[in-house]
Image: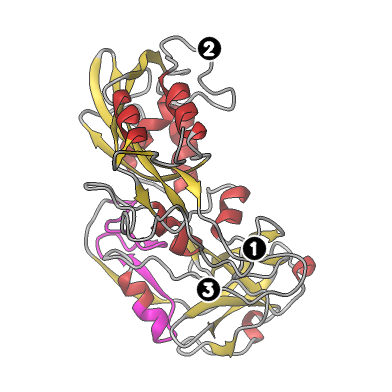
Amino acid sequence: MDGGVGGHGGGGDELLVRLREFEGRAATVGGAGRDPVNAPMIRHWCEAMGDTHPAYRGPDAVAPPTMLQAWTMGGLAGHTGRPGRSDTNDELFALLDGAGCTSVVATDCEQEYLCPLRPGDEITFDSMIESVSERKTTKLGTGYFITTRMDVRAGGELAGTHRFRILKYAPAHRSPRGDEGSDDGARGSGGAGRPAGTGDTAEATSTTGPAVPVGPAETVGAMGSAVAGGTAGAPQPRSSRPRPVVNRDNAGFWEGVGRQRLLIQRCTGCGTLRFPWLPGCNACGGPEWDTVEASGEGTVYSYVVMHHPPFPAFDPPYAVGLIELAEGVRMVSNVVGVPHDRVRVGMPVRLEFRQYDEELLLPVFRAGAGREGGGTAGGPATSSAAPGDVGVPSGGRS
């Protein structure tokens, strides 16, 4: 198709016209979950997410609402060849690939819960292409946001709706320094790439993704993508370190970091500590909370050594640890003060704050400090950043 992304004919977007022919087309009709809703999957989910709510245990247990999509997943084998699947997604993706939109990133999802799911429920689902946005420009590149809607049923009754949004895009051209270059006149032709009514966009993923909190249940691969590494070969000018995503739920945490205090939420109803910060208690559901300041003591609960993928702001290899704080909650951050190949599970660490530039202060953990290390509970040690340090905190739950 002439013109690449959004080929132009008489000033119009011919590709968009073809893409919008897919709106309303079914992608799955009468799909069936591989397994009924079951207690083992509920238990594993709750353990991974740190959710101890009593409603998810016992003979009258229900499934956590946020498991809605889990019951529809095809597993490692995917959905190929499964009953109900159409070729709609394949045709849509082939059209986008042919127009140069060869890359894809998930941007956000929306879920609506209509009735609880219980062990033994047989899950069926239908999905369709709900909408295709106009051509959008983001820091990742130029492309189209595709929203898929899935209706999930239990015993024929609608249990919930899941909307999943991706950006299918042509990667932006970048200079050797990692700066964006021109991209088919893309600048100014779509703003931040936020179609009306969407949540987070690919731009947000691109510029702030490495600081998004993730839980201890995230895989090594997910931890890796959250703290992507640096470029190999000859030294290059380093890009600025990605900024954390600050919202109304975690703003208090980042305000504490700005005062060199690591604050943990505490439910005022049941006293449960939680990290990352959440709008409500995952133990009793209570919405009220206060904070306690972490002592700064911790141990390495788990870790990865990052070699790939390359990311201009970081210099691999470096160690990223899942740190269990003395208070019992866990968070992901950089392990400093020891070579990456010397980090070990159970190693004592001590909180300190590192200034990465004029604006960015982040908590990291110095290995080998333990209870004899520097800093006090009220004022952990502060130091300047060293090459290869990540300093990107992410949250886990106890």
**Residue matched to label 2:** 81
Magenta-drawn stretch contains 176: no
Up/down of 117 relative to 135, above or below? above
Up/down of 373 relative to 117, above or below? below
**Residue matched to label 3:** 241
Q: How is the image coloured?
A: secondary structure
Which segment is the magenta one? 255-284
Helix or strand or loop: what does disc 3 sit on?
A: loop
Q: Which one is in front, 139 or 111?
A: 139
Mark 1–mark 2 CB contact (< 8 Å)? no
Residue 223 location in percent, x, y? 58, 55
Residue 254 location in percent, x, y? 37, 75
Residue 262 location in percent, x, y? 44, 77
Residue type at mark 1: give it.
Gly
Q: Residues within 10 Å of mark 2 (few under 14, many from 20)?
A: few
- Label 1, label 2: how far apart the Cα atoms are: 37 Å
Up/down of 49 relative to 250, above or below? above
- Label 1, label 3: how far apart the Cα atoms are: 11 Å
Magenta-drawn stretch contains 273: yes
Residue 257 location in percent, x, y? 42, 80
The residue located at (40%, 23%) in the rendering is 37
Q: Which one is in front, 367 or 68?
A: 68
- Which mark is first along the chain, 2 or 3? 2
Residue 398 visible within the image: no
Residue type at mark 2: give it.
Gly
Q: Which one is in front, 224 or 117?
A: 224
**Residue matched to label 1:** 229
- Label 3, label 2: how far apart the Cα atoms are: 44 Å
Q: Residue furthest front?
A: 10
Helix or strand or loop: what does disc 2 sit on?
A: loop
The residue located at (25%, 25%) in the rendering is 159
